[in-house]
Image: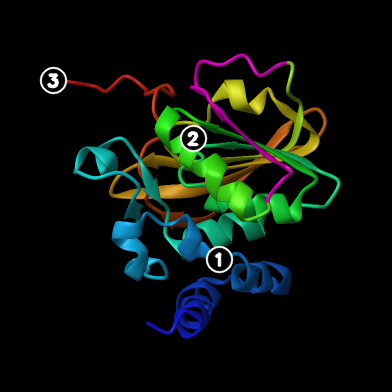
Amino acid sequence: MNVEQARFNMIEQQIRPWDVLDARVLELLAVVRREDFVPPAHRALAFADLELPLKPGEDAVRRGQVMLAPRVEARMLQDLQLAKHEKVLEVGTGSGFMAALLGHRAQRVLSLEIDNELAQTAHANLQRAGALNVEVRALDAARADLSNDGPFDAIVLSGSVAELPQSMLDLLKPGGRLMAIVGDEPMMRATLVQHAGNSLVSTQPWDTCAPRLLNFPEPARFRF
């Protein structure tokens, strides 16, 4: 496989057509080596328009242990509009690729991963990639007390939730943004929340689907 040609095709055929037009994001995707964050068994698919399992077996997908499709990560990064002075929280480190992208755009990134083995792998991947401003913690973000780490300029949930978690919204600085994929299959909405001082302003700029982040609240379902 011609890796550089595959990377170029990913950017031009998947990501740019998905309205990712920010030159800084496109240039970053050409520089950060996605293939270095993909498990060896799936490296040939590093640039495919797919969610890639990060552990063997079907249970990995059920538990949300996947890399999101490149176009989804790129669009989330673009919509957050990060600045170099900002502090970012990511929930769902996975292999560390999104954290690496965030680290290039922000001053500091704290990334939380509920699975200890994945957290260790992500840390190693990020160290090899030189992303020294990214800290990975093996932690259940849905139950953790992050008050001493916040507030944050930006928060990104690298997976889906049924509804926006109040615990995450409470960690936003005034002027801060939270990016999440919200709802249920077959169609979820990318949701961008901006802290406008005395209120939160929410927009839903695009549709997608993504595996669930574990342990965040699920609304009660009506049953006959």
Q: Is residue 144 above or below residue 191?
A: above
- Say which of marks 3 and 2 sits in front: 2
Count neighbours of disc 2 (C-alpha within 10 A) and say few if under 14, some if 14 to 19, many if 20 or more: many
Badge 1 amino acid: Arg
Q: Which residue is mark 2?
A: 119
In the image, 202: left or right of 114? right
Q: Count of labels shown?
A: 3
Q: Magenta part of the protein: which range?
A: 131-147
Q: Which residue is mark 1?
A: 33
Tell me which corner region of the image, top left, top right, bottom left or bottom right, holds residue 62. top left
Residue located at (62% from left, 47% from top):
127
Residue type, numbered disc 3: Phe
Mark toward the start of the polypeptide (1 vs 3): 1
Query: Which one is nearer the viewer's eye here, 17 or 128?
Result: 128
Label 1 and label 3: CA atoms lie apart by 50 Å
116, above or below 74, in the image? above
The verdict on residue 111 being magenta is: no
Q: Is residue 156 above or below residue 21?
A: above
**Residue at figure coordinates x 30%, y 35% from the top left:** 63
Location of residue 183 by image quarter: top left
Q: SS for tag 1?
A: loop
